[in-house]
Image (cartoon, rainbow, N blue to C red):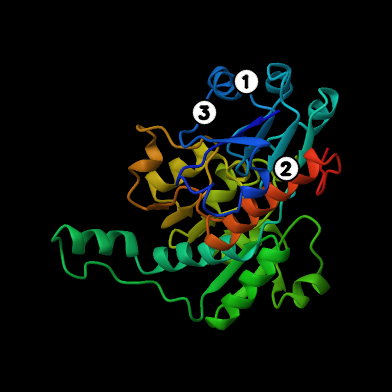
Amino acid sequence: MTVRCAVLDDYQGVAGSFADWSPLAGQVELRPLRQHLDTVDALVEAVGDCGIVVVMRERTPFTAEVFARLPQLRLLVTSGMRNASIDLAAAAAHGVTVCGTASHPQPPLELTWALILGLARQLGRESGAVRENGPWQSTIGTDLYGRRLGLIGLGKIGAEAARIGRAFGMDVVGWSPNLTTERAGAAGAALAGSLGELLETSDFVSIHLVLGDRTRGLLGVDELRRMRRSAYLVNTSRAAIVDRDALARALREGWIAGAGLDVFETEPLAADDEYRSLPNLLATPHLGYVTERNYRSYFGEAVEDITAFLARNPVRRLA
């Protein structure tokens, strides 16, 4: 019997080309869905007859309500080995196996530096001016050399960001709730005495934390007001670490020079979202993990997960 398999949020229409699905021929009917399903009703209507669903990162939440309304679902595959949008306890309660895939840390690190460099040299504005026959060379760039890079989080990605910052000749400091002087030093950074100190003294602040109870809303009005008016904030981690309303106000009122964002609490952004029109915001549509290497891992290992599940021997199991 053929099992229907939906691939959600295949925006670029590449799920079928970044992996060899032929081992599943005759067993699985592939259904790539390119449009985002932004309501539970739309999701249920689109995949209600599917026994397998492949999700891209945290684009589509799978809550207890969703599992209850998808009685035919037996396998959920997520790209990456962690997905905060999936209720693993609810999956287990409804008899749904959840499996993951590899996910490489280098792509979001690279995008972090794309945003930092884009902000420093006003690339969005200057590139737009060239395309639109606007003013030739209308801005003055911000140097990286000799400036301070403040990293909120010095884990795997944060430590690599520190290494690149040093290569640019930047002074690098780090802070996180449990960061020690020894761990900061091992990453080539000085330990900031507090989050406030990091914000007050840094020219560029980049966030590299996992979202949790202690980090949700970590940067709000008080924290953003402590940043320098000439400073830039970059977030390629999780949107909810920064209070959205506070950041929008900071950008509107010039508390900081600008921000680079690749993550948003609601994706895609609504057509009338203020973030689409703020001139000092450099925004990208959650591209951090969207590279050829990651997609080969995501879809290639999704095929492996499905093959193993059908053989009753699940691999990379999360629930």
* Of marks 2 and 1, the one in the foreground: 2
What is the quadrant of residue 170 in the picture? bottom right
123 or 104: nearer the eye?
104
Name the residue at 69% across, 20% down: 70
Q: Does residue 281 appear to the left or right of 88 in the view shown?
A: left
What is the quadrant of residue 66 in the picture? top right
Q: Mark 3–mark 2 contact, CB under 8 Å?
A: no
Q: Which residue is the site of mark 1?
A: 48
42 or 182: nearer the eye?
42
Q: Amino acid at mark 3?
A: Leu
Name the residue at 46% across, 62% down: 115
Q: Amino acid at mark 1?
A: Gly
Q: How many marks?
A: 3
Q: Amino acid at mark 2?
A: Ile
Q: Residues within 10 Å of mark 1 (few under 14, many from 20)?
A: some
Name the residue at 63% across, 21% down: 49
Mark 1: which secondary structure?
loop
- Cα separation, mark 3 vs mark 1, equals 13 Å
- Cα separation, mark 2 vs mark 1, equals 18 Å
Q: Residue furthest left?
A: 133
Q: Which residue is the site of mark 2?
A: 306
Mark 3: which secondary structure?
loop
Q: Residues within 10 Å of mark 2 (few under 14, many from 20)?
A: many
Q: Quadrant of the C terminus?
A: top right
Q: Which residue is the site of mark 3?
A: 37
* Of marks 3 and 1, the one in the foreground: 1
Percent of width and height locating residue 263: 53, 47
Percent of width and height locating residue 137: 21, 70
Percent of width and height locating residue 262: 50, 51
